[in-house]
Image (cartoon, rainbow, N blue to C red):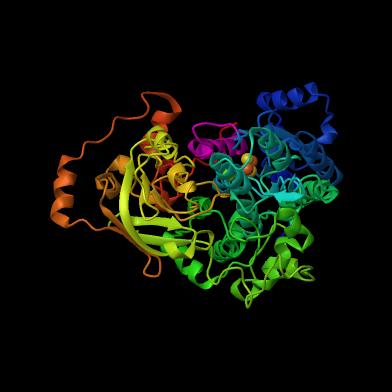
Amino acid sequence: MNSRKKPSELRSARWFAPDDLRSSGHRSRTMQMGYAPEEWIDKPVIAILNTWSDANPCHAHFKHRVEDVKRGILQAGGFPLELPALSLSESYVKPTTMLYRNMLAMEAEELLRSHPVDGAVLMGGCDKTTPGLVMGALSMGLPMIYLPAGPMLRGNYRGEYLGSGSDAWKFWDERRAGTISEKEWVDVEAGIARSYGHCMTMGTASTMTAIAEALGLTLPGASSIPAPDANHIRMSSAVGRRIVEMVWEDLVPAKIVTEAAVNNAVAVAMATGCSTNAVVHLIAMARRAGIDLSLDDLDQAGRTTPVLANIRPTGKAYLMEDFYYAGGLRALMAKLASKLDLTTLTVSGVTLGETLEGAKCYNDDVIRSLDNPVYHEGSLAVLKGNLAPTGAVIKPAACDPRFHKHQGPALVFDTYAEMKAAVDDETLDITPDHVMVLRGAGPQGGPGMPEWGMLPIPKALLKQGHRDMLRLSDARMSGTSYGACILHVSPESHVGGPLALLRNGDIVRLDLEARRIDMLVDEDELQRRRDAWVKPAEKFGRGYGWMFSRHVAQADTGCDFDFLESSFGPSPGEPDI
Ligand code: FES
Ligand code: MG
C-alpha cells in the first residue's frame, strides 16, 4: 500500500498548524465550539456532507445516522465536521431535481475546497444526490467514501407488496380506469412508503447507489442494506473508521475511479436493470474523472450484459429488501464476475475481487445467473436516427415486446399541460398504434429535463384495456417507470433538434434491433420545416436557471455544466489561507 501521510502533511494542517494570526483564529474558533486542541490537532478532519433535511423523507434517518459516522471517525482518531448540503428531495423539488443536480455537485466540490478538511463522507441516496455528491467530490479529489441511505422497506397494501413509483403508476391507471375507489387509494398512499430510506424499486436511487458501489466508492455491500436495518448503522460507523485510514493512506478517488471501474459500473448498471437516468449520470460522473464514456459505450455494454436483478420495474417480482436478503449487490457482482475487472481498487483499500470473496446468493430467483437472466440483454438500448441524431434511450425489457418494432402516426404535444388535458379526454381520437410525443421537455426546454417521459396512456385507450403504447420525448422518466418510452432525445427540440420538426400524423418508426428511431418525412420537407422553425423564448431571465440554460450540456453527454467538466480548464488548486 502507499506510504502513510505524516500529520504535518494533512491538508487541514495548513489551516490549523502555522504560528500566525490567521491560524490562531482557526484554532480559537474551534475551541469556541468546545473542542480542546488535542481533539483535532494532528488528526484527519473529515467532512461529512449530509443531505438530510425536513423535506427529504428518503434521508430522514441521516439526522441521526450522521452521529454513527461521527462515532466511527472519533474511534479511528479523526475529527468529524458535519457540513449540510442541498437535500434534493425527489419527492418535492420542482420542476425537477435534475435542474439542481449540478448545483449540488458545485456545492459538494466547493464545500470541500473551502473548508479545512482532509477527507469526506458523502451521505446521499435519493436519486440525484448520488451523482451530485460524487461528481463534486471527484472534481475536488480528496479521499472520500459514499454512504448510501439504503432502500426503504417494501410497501404493503392488503397483503400485496408495493414498489415505489412503479406501483403508484400502475395503480393510478386502475384508479383512472375506475377499478380503485378514492377510499382504497388512501390505503395505497399509506402503504407504498412506510419507512425512511430511498425508493425500494430498482429506480434511480437504487441504481445510482449500486453504481457508486461498483465504482469502488462504498464499503462492500453497503448499497443494498435497507435503511432501517441495524446493519446500516454498523455500516455507517465503519465508514467513519475507514475514511480516517483512507486519509493516512492518501487513497484518493483518482486511484479508484479508473476506466476499468467505470466499465464495471456500466456492467453492474445493466445487470441491475437500471433506471434510464443512470445513462445521464454515469456519463457525467465518468467525465468528471476524465473518462470519456459515450452513449455508444453504454449501448455496447447493454448488448452484452443481461439483466440479473429480478427487481421491479424491469424484473417482475421483487423489491430491494428481497435483493438484500438474497445476498445484495455483492452476490450480483459475484455472478457477473466474468464481465467485471476484479483488479480495480475500492475504498476498502483492497480490490473489487477481494471484496467479493465469500459473496453468496441465497435466492436464485431474485438474483439470476448469466445463463438464466431476467432479460437476455442489458436494461438499456441507445437509439439513433433522423429524430435523434446524437441519441435517445429506451428500456426494452420494461416495455411490451410488440413495440420493439413499430411504426405509427405521431400525436405531438408542445407542453405538458396540453398533453395532460388530452390524455384525460375520453373522446381523444387516438389508436393503440399512435406514437405520443412530448417535446420542449429536455435539459433547456423542460427546464431541467423533468421526468415526464412516461406519458400517461390516454383514458380513451385505457378503457379499451390498453396499458402500453409507444411514447417519445426529450424528457427523462422516473427510474421506477416502465413502458415503451423513448427518452432523452438529443439534441432536444428547444435547441432545434429534429424532434422540433415533427408534426401530427407523421409516421414515426422504431426498430430496436437496428437501434433506429426515425420519422418517415423526406429531406426536402424537413428542410422546409427547419427554415420555418422559430427558437422558443428563453426560460429564465435571471438567477440560477439563467446560468443553467447557458451552460448545461445535452443529455447524450451527461447534462453537466460545460465549465464544471474536467476538460474545461485547470482546477483552481488550493485556496489561499
Ligand atoms: Fe427519494 Fe425516490 S423519492 S429515492
Ligand atoms: Mg426517481
Q: Picture coordinates of residue 255 (x, y %)?
A: 61, 59
Write the residue at 71% across / 68% down: 365
* In this view, 359 is above or below 528: below
* Magenta span includes 61: no
> Who is closer to the viewer here, 462 or 508?
462
Toward the top, the furthest residue is 32
Q: Picture coordinates of residue 76 (x, y %)?
A: 84, 47
How many discs mark residues in the rendered view? 0
Report the quarter where the C terminus lies: top right
Prevailing secondary structure of the magenta residues: helix
Give the side of residue 345 with respect to residue 463, left or right: right
Q: Is residue 472 visible?
A: yes
Q: Is residue 78 visible?
A: no
Give the side of residue 404 with respect to residue 285, left or right: left
Write the residue at 66% across / 54% down: 217
Write the residue at 41% across / 34% down: 421
Report the quarter where the N terminus lies: bottom right
Q: Picture coordinates of residue 12 (x, y %)?
A: 69, 38
Give the side of residue 53 with respect to residue 287, left or right: right
Bounds of the magenta segment:
92-114
Q: Picture coordinates of residue 545 (x, y %)?
A: 42, 30
Write the residue at 35% across / 39% down: 440
